[in-house]
Image: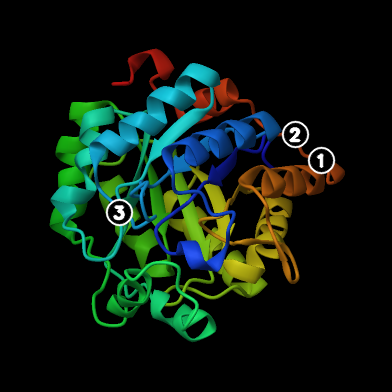
Amino acid sequence: MAKKVILTCAITGSGHTPSMSPYLPYTIEDVVDQSVAAAEAGASIIHLHARDPKDGRPTPDPDVFMAYLTAIKARCDVVLSVSSGGGTGMTVAQRLEGVLRAKPELATLNMGTMNYGGFTMIDRYRGAWKFDWEEPYLEQTRRDPFVSTYTDIEYMLNVVGPETGARFECEAYDTSHLYTLAYYLDKGLVKPPIFVQTIFGTMGGIGTDVDHIVQMRRTADRLLGDAYEWSVLGAGRFQMGVVTAAAIMGAHVRVGLEDSLYLGKGQLAESNADQVRKIRGILEALSLEIATPDEAREILHLKGRDQVGF
């Protein structure tokens, strides 16, 4: 079991839309305040997507990222991870603008192209949209995949990493993504310790059965050996169950309103900090200790908050 558990909180993401929860942050002030509150509640890492502060639509605008990052850094010492995932319809170049500008300690790296199916949420909210962009955005995921080709991955490893000094949160939505990661480890393009974020329960990715969690863990052990640090997130209603099961197996964990809007059955989480406090209580009841931001930096070999571009 991990000596210290790195607790990541994904604040807003790009999959949920404002109509789904009044607590999903999208203004700069709300994203910053919820990030700081999550850090104060115990999060080691804050994982950030950017949203247009006027209507909450996902945006690649590096100015928005910089507004988040500078304000959060001024108020706490949490590790800040900038997403290169962006949102549906963005080009790879657009998705990388924030990472290249901010030069963060961590950035995400999706280990393959996939059909990320946000369209499945449309029927639940149809007719109750707060903004006109929401339904067409979700419908677009029915036809447009999230693209991360081998060329894209190699650009991240050969150019973005060296130019920014960022290490990667390598996101694996299925077993095949672990094989891709192992290929680049064997080529020497990925350097240990690899921070592997395995995702369970998204439409288009691996499911949430405990057997799948065990399978991903065993596959990573076989392919990556002792070169990786394993983290787990569960989507939607499976969030807390998946991360608890994985923590018992030795995983680091991730929660946040990007992954689930709920705190419990039928109960919307009123903040990201609510979810952090809940999983922290579960972990501490299991006699697991949460890593501080500086301990997370040491575990993941990050460059330090004084070396970022913000």
- Which residue appears at 15% of the width and 45% of the height? 155
Give how far apart the Cα atoms at labels 2 and 3 are: 32 Å
Q: Mark 1 belongs to which amino acid?
A: Glu
Pointers 2 and 1 in contact (C-beta within 8 Å)? yes
Pointers 2 and 3 in contact (C-beta within 8 Å)? no
Compare marks 2 and 1 and give the one earlier in the sequence.
Answer: 1
Give how far apart the Cα atoms at labels 2 and 1 are: 6 Å
Q: Mark 3 belongs to which amino acid?
A: Gly
Foreground residue, 38 or 291? 38
Left or right side of 273 for 57: left
Q: Name the residue under label 2.
A: 289
Q: Residue 264 location, x and y as percent?
A: 75, 64
Which quarter shows the C terminus? top left
Residue count near mark 2 (Cα–Cα under 10 Å), binned few <14, some 14–19, many ≥20: some
Q: In which quarter of the image is residue 308?
A: top left
Mark yes or no: residue 227 visible.
no
Identify the secondary structure beneath mark 2: loop
Q: Residue 53 location, x and y as percent?
A: 37, 46
Q: Residue 146 location, x and y as percent?
A: 27, 67
Residue count near mark 1 (Cα–Cα under 10 Å), binned few <14, some 14–19, many ≥20: few
- 280 shown above or below 219: above
Q: Name the residue under label 3.
A: 86
Q: Mark 1 points at which residue?
A: 284
- Which residue appears at 17% of the width and 54% of the height? 92
